[in-house]
Every structure is written in C-alpha cells, then in structure tokens.
C-alpha cells in the first residue's frame, strides 16, 4: 500500500493516548508539583498585606445649598460651577498633603521608618486616594466616586470622610471669600463715591462763600445795600453785587454755618441706600455646601486585596499546567 507521510504523527507530536500514559505514570510527580505551586500561592495569598477599600459617592450641590452665594445680581453661582471647583480641589495636592499630615498617615504607609515623608506621600498615600468621575449617572448629573485604600478598615472610612469634609469646607471658604471680596469691593466703591461727593460739595460751598464775599465787597464799595425793584423788574441778568450787601452777607453767613452738605448733594441718598443694603448682607456658611453626599464612606467588611481565592485558583491551574509540561518533557515511554 502507498505510504502517506502526512498520515503519520511527527516525532514532536504526542497522542492523547501517550498523554494519558504520562498522566498515569507521572501522577505522583504531577500531584507534588501542583501541590507545591498551590501551597506557594496559598502562602502568598495569606501572608500578603491586607488592604481595605472605602468609597464615598458624591453629587452636585442642590440649589438651596448655594443660594446664599448668589447675592443680588453681581455674583451668580451655578451648581455645576461650584461642583467643578470642588472636584478640582479633590485632586489638589495641598489638601491631600494637609490631610496626610494632620492624620499622621505616614505611619500607616511607610514600609521602613527611615523613608522620607514626601516619598511616602507621593508613592503610597497619593496613589491610594483616587477620584473617578462619570462612573455612573443619576438624574443626568455627574456622579463622582472617591476611594481610599489602606490596611485598616476603620481608618479607611474615617480618613476618606474627613477628606471630603476638608475639601468641602475649603471649597466653601474659597467661594465665600470670593463673594465677600466682591461685596467689599462694591462697598469700597460706594464709600469712595460718597466721600468724593461730600468733599466736592464742601469745596463748592467754600467757592460759593468766596464768590459771595467778593460780591458783597463790591456792593459795599458801590453803596448798594439792597436790590432795587427796578433791577428786579427789568428781567435782565444783573451782576451778583447788584443783590446788595445785606442779601449777599446773609447767604454767605448761612453757608458758613451749615453743618452738613448731605441734603444738598444730588444722588447721595441713593448711594447711601445701596451701601446700607450691601452692609446688611451676611453669608451663612453653615447653609452652604459645595457637594451633595449621596453616600458617606462606611467601614468595609472585607478586604479588596489580596484576592485569596483567585490567587490560589491561579496557583493551582499554573501548578497543574507546569507539572504536566515537566512530566511530558522528561517522559520516555516504556518499551
């Protein structure tokens, strides 16, 4: 019969029957290698540091939470703008470092006591505190998740909640300072306008007194004591000295005795009214929030690392594959 070279297995191939022989003959070897690898994986799974993960879920602030910031028409804040500022502050290293120092977290992250605090902050803590945005949405609003991983379950939730409180307080403080800055600028502007009006009103009064005194001196020199009926009836604009020394000196004396020019300053009362309204504005910080807490962080019940069952399962599978490969590599069929 014709010989078919393609119908015969090559020397490098092994049949299922041969594989079965390998498994049967090397079963003890396969078992021991698989057991050794599985035990190694088990030891790694149980002796690896335990890590707990706490999470907190955040939403944009409600309209009532930022209502105090919207003062009249000069400062208009939306929930979105306030929320965006809060989220940016979540990433700010200044607030993270402040929390890191205040909570003395270097002791929980430093593998060695002689590690530099800055290195621990950058390489350990900063990586353990993560912010994720748009993981999911509720009511078409951005949903932000902040998580923190550490070896202490109680500490994980405590630090995370304190971090959110810190960022919210600092964000609100920045917003309030911004509004107060605008208020103070407006009030300074109004005070300057009022002071300017009063200053120039006094100068105008002094100018008027000087003009009256000079006119009175001219009238006295001309012997004009009182204005005549003829001068009044002509309808012609007469020089000021024509009013006579009596009327001119009375007006000048009254202007000198004036205690305040306020009633005679046009627009002064309107400016004062605006200033009073601005000075009555107070910002209630307790009613302001830069974020809505959908769910505060709670103490995690089980660790997220290491995933022991997964590690042991992978160790068993790898051990079995390795043992079969080694058994096949060193197996020689019995004659």
Image (cartoon, rainbow, N blue to C red):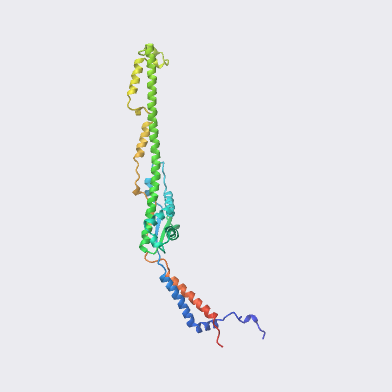
Where is 87 relative to 198, above or below?
A: below
**Foreground residue, 44 or 287?**
44
How many discs mark residues in the rendered view? 0
Q: Quadrant of residue 48?
A: bottom left
Screen quadrant of the C terminus: bottom right
**Which quadrant of the view contains residue 262?**
top left
Residue 185, visible in the rendered structure: yes
- Image coords of residue 161 (percent x, y): 37, 57
Q: Where's the N terminus, which quadrant?
A: bottom right
Give me the residue at 37% from left, 46% from top: 68
Q: Residue at x 34, y 23 (%)?
A: 256
The reply to whether residue 295 is in sight is no
Q: Is residue 70 above or below residue 34?
A: above
Q: In percent of the image, x 36 and y 32: which residue is there? A: 269
Residue 299 image offset from top left, x and y in percent: 36, 62
Q: Outermost residue, right direction?
A: 2
Q: Position of residue 310 (x, y in %)?
A: 44, 71
Q: Which residue lies most toward the bottom here? A: 335
| Picture coordinates of residue 211, whole percent (x, y) | 39, 20
From the viewer's perspective, is 167 left or right of 323?
A: left
Near-viewer residue (34 or 115): 115
Against 35, residue 291 (above or below) is: above
Along the viewing direction, whichever of 70 and 107 lies nearer the viewer: 107
């Amino acid at each position: 019969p014709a010989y078919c070279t393609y119908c015969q297995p090559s020397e490098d191939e092994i049949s299922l029957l041969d594989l079965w022989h390998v498994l049967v003959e090397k079963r003890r070897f396969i078992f021991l290698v698989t057991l050794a690898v599985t035990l190694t994986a088990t030891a790694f799974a149980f002796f690896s540091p335990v890590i707990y993960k706490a999470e907190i879920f955040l939403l944009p602030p409600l309209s009532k939470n930022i209502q105090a910031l919207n003062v009249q028409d000069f400062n208009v804040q939306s929930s979105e703008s306030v929320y965006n500022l809060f989220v940016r502050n979540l990433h700010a290293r200044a607030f993270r470092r402040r929390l890191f120092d205040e909570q003395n977290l270097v002791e929980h992250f430093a593998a060695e006591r002689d590690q530099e605090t800055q290195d621990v902050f950058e390489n350990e803590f900063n990586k353990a505190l993560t912010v994720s945005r748009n993981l999911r949405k509720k009511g078409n609003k951005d949903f932000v998740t902040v998580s923190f991983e550490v070896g202490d379950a109680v500490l994980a939730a405590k630090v995370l909640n304190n971090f959110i409180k810190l960022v919210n307080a600092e964000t609100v403080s920045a917003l309030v300072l911004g509004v107060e800055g605008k208020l103070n600028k407006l009030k300074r502007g109004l005070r300057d306008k009022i002071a300017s009006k009063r200053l120039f009103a006094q100068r105008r009064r002094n100018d008027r007194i000087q003009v009256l005194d000079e006119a009175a001196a001219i009238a006295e020199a001309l012997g004009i004591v009182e204005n005549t009926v003829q001068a009044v009836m002509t309808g012609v604009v007469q020089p000021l000295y024509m009013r006579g020394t009596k009327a001119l000196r009375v007006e000048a004396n009254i202007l000198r005795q004036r205690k305040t020019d306020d009633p005679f300053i046009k627009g002064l009362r309107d400016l004062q009214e605006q200033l009073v309204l601005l000075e009555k504005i107070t910002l209630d910080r307790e009613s302001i929030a830069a974020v809505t807490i959908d769910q505060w962080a709670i103490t995690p019940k089980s660790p997220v690392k290491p995933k022991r069952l997964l590690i042991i399962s992978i160790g068993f599978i790898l051990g079995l594959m390795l043992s079969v490969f080694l058994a096949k590599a060193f197996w020689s069929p019995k004659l």
